[in-house]
Image (cartoon, helix red, strand yellow):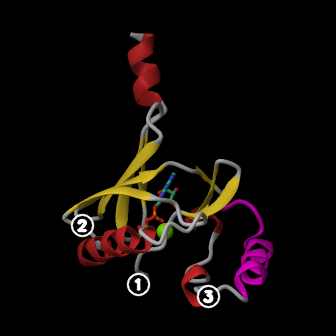
Amino acid sequence: MNKIIDLLGDNMIKIGGNRIVFVFKYIPYIIKIPNLKYGFKLGMESNKQEYKYSKLKREDLCEVKFNLFNILILMDKADVISNNISWLEFQNYIENKYRYDNMSSFMLEDIKPSNWGILNGKLVKIDYGKIK
Ligand SMILES: Nc1ncnc2c1ncn2[C@@H]1O[C@H](COP(=O)(O)OP(=O)(O)O)[C@@H](O)[C@H]1O
Ligand SMILES: [Mg+2]
């Protein structure tokens, strides 16, 4: 019984602006589906965009492994950066890092800690979908 509770307990559902994200404890992937209530269209477009840009194989874009009609994408699971850190310092850091990048404006969209994560010791963008 404890094992079942343990299994359920550490799985998480995150409600983003456009998508609902399922994070599973023992699986190194997450699932994003459009948030039916608020962002169905944007959620589909965001899934589509992440699938498309992921194909560039940039090591700082968390990789999308699978796309089911833009309704569901499977992405590598990262350790999400906490929104409790200084947003200003984080934004300055990211702005400096990507100032001369060839995809600068794309990488600098919607900078907030919770749209970034750490995967294999590297900082990766985990939300590079469409913004409202
Ligand atoms: N690759 C990922 N690994 C771990 N958690 C993630 C990942 N992608 C998203 N999340 C979690 O889900 C939340 C919402 O996902 P996000 O892509 O930002 O959705 P939205 O487009 O709705 O803002 C994130 O803030 C983060 O907490
Ligand atoms: Mg987001």
Which mark, residue 116? Answer: none
Which mark, residue 102? Answer: 3
Q: Position of residue 62 (x, y in %)?
A: 52, 60
Name the front one of labels 1 and 3. 3
- Depth check: 112 or 128 in front? 128
Q: Quadrant of residue 96?
A: bottom right
Looking at the image, is mark 3 or mark 2 earlier in the sequence?
Answer: 2
Name the front one of labels 3 and 2. 3
Residue visible at 50% across and 66% down in the picture: 57
**Considering only vertical position in the picture, is 61 above or below 4?**
below
Residue visible at 40% across and 28% down in the picture: 8
Gap in Å between the C-alphas at discs 1 and 3? 24 Å
Which mark, residue 70? Answer: 2
Q: What secondary structure is found at the residue carrying circle 1? A: loop
Which amino acid type is shown beneath numbered disc 3? Asn
Q: Quadrant of residue 5?
A: top left
Q: Is residue 67 left or right of residue 118?
A: left
- Depth check: 70 or 53 in front? 53
Residue that label 1 marks: 132
Q: Position of residue 67 (x, y in %)?
A: 27, 60
Magenta range: 82-99
Gap in Å between the C-alphas at discs 3 and 2? 26 Å
Q: Position of residue 34 (x, y in %)?
A: 28, 65
Residue visible at 78% across and 75% down in the picture: 93
